[in-house]
Amino acid sequence: MTILKLIWEFFKTGLFSIGGGLATLPFLYQMSDRYGWFTHSEVANMLAVSESTPGPIGVNMATYTGVTTAGILGGLIATLSLVTPSVIVILIIASALQHFRENRFVQAALSALRPVSVGLVAAAVLSVFAASLFDFQALAERNWAGITSWGAMLTFAVLLAVYLKWRKLHPIFLVLMGAAAGILLKL
Amino acid sequence: MRTLLDLYLSFFRIGLFTFGGGYAMLPMLQREVVDKHHWVTEQDVLDCYAIGQCTPGVIAVNTGTFVGYKQQGALGGIVATLGVITPSIIIITVIAMVLQGFAENPYVIHAFAGIRIAVAVLTLLAVIKLYKSGVKGAAANALLAATFLLRVLFSVSPVLLVLAAIVLGVVLELVKGRRKTQ
């Protein structure tokens, strides 16, 4: 029975959470209220685990919820239920785009969409930036010395220099260097 | 068959080394599907990010489905999606079952503070690359600047911004068409 509920709940979440992983949060709170599978503070723990593991946050949250409520099978099923609606929607859009690619209105819409898409990504990059280099808690408390750390700035400068010098370097190496610097400098 | 396996493995790598969600996968995506395999162009990546913003689901999954479809049809879309979610399923299952204190471990916390800095560097350069390939001319630059400011200063929803761009593009094309016929 729990499995059926997991399928239904995560299918719904996948269908209605628009704009990325964090959009799944309100749905998880709702599940917590309705079924008591986990508490609100467990949702916060799940988010922490999702953010400190690779992979899309929405997918991580689905797997974690499924495993903790119904074991390995539950995790697998919750995750597949989450991605099914978006796979269907994207397949429909992608095939429509392929057929109407040459249509001048589709062309016009896409040419207006591209700069907007870059603008959206740039805005997201700014927030990644702010979150990785600055401590907003310290800013709010007017603790000027605690806003950023020399270690974080140094790591940023070194990683940027390395990546600019060796543009062919696979992003994985930069991620691993970041992890090593984090542990060594206790960032 | 070979391409399907390549799709699965490429998206498996993307899923394994994407930390922090959809936007953080951009540098990995450019490297794997644009530079290395030439499955899609830089412009396709942009289109697919815009579409991913206003359709249901996780952006990383939407991108996987889109790229897979372009390369190998519906089956390709499904295979790429399974590739991008496999690492998460394995890692999270292990953590949920045996490593309860994972997120509180001090080494994990420090490592992730460092990884976030690496992700900042990678995404910064990825967005510059995206800009160079997709935004040309004064009108496009103005549109980009407007989107950025509306998003950062007023937190306007990305769904709204994407829909507005579609409407704007279609209306401009209608106006252009009418001028031509007159």
Image (cartoon, coloured by chain):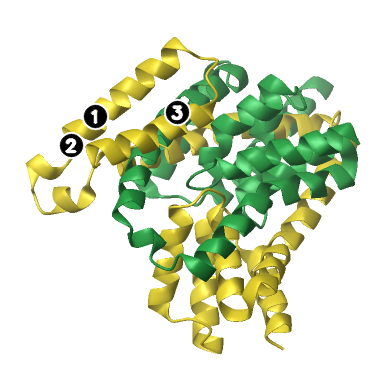
Q: Amino acid at mark 2?
A: Ser
Q: Colour of chain A?
A: yellow
| Vertical arrangement, residue B91 with respect to residue A151, above or below | below
The reply to whether callout 3 and callout 2 are in contact (CB within 8 Å) is no
Which mark's residue is nearer the viewer, 3 or 2? 3
* Pick the front one: A108 or B69: B69
The residue wearing badge 2 is A149
Looking at the rendering, in which quadrant would you find the N terminus of chain A? bottom right
The reply to whether callout 3 and callout 1 are in contact (CB within 8 Å) is no
| Vertical arrangement, residue A9 with respect to residue A107, above or below | below
Residue at 72% x, 70% y is A77
Q: Chain of mark 2?
A: A
Q: Colour of chain B?
A: green
Q: Pinpoint residue B90: horizontal percent, then vertical percent.
A: 62, 57
Q: CA distance from mark 2 to mark 1?
A: 6 Å
Q: Amino acid at mark 1?
A: Met
Which secondary structure, mark 3?
helix
Residue A134 is left or right of residue B103, and the answer is left
Any part of residue A162 in sight? yes
- Numbered mark located on residue A174 in the image: 3
Q: CA distance from mark 3 to mark 2?
A: 20 Å
The reply to whether callout 2 and callout 1 are in contact (CB within 8 Å) is yes
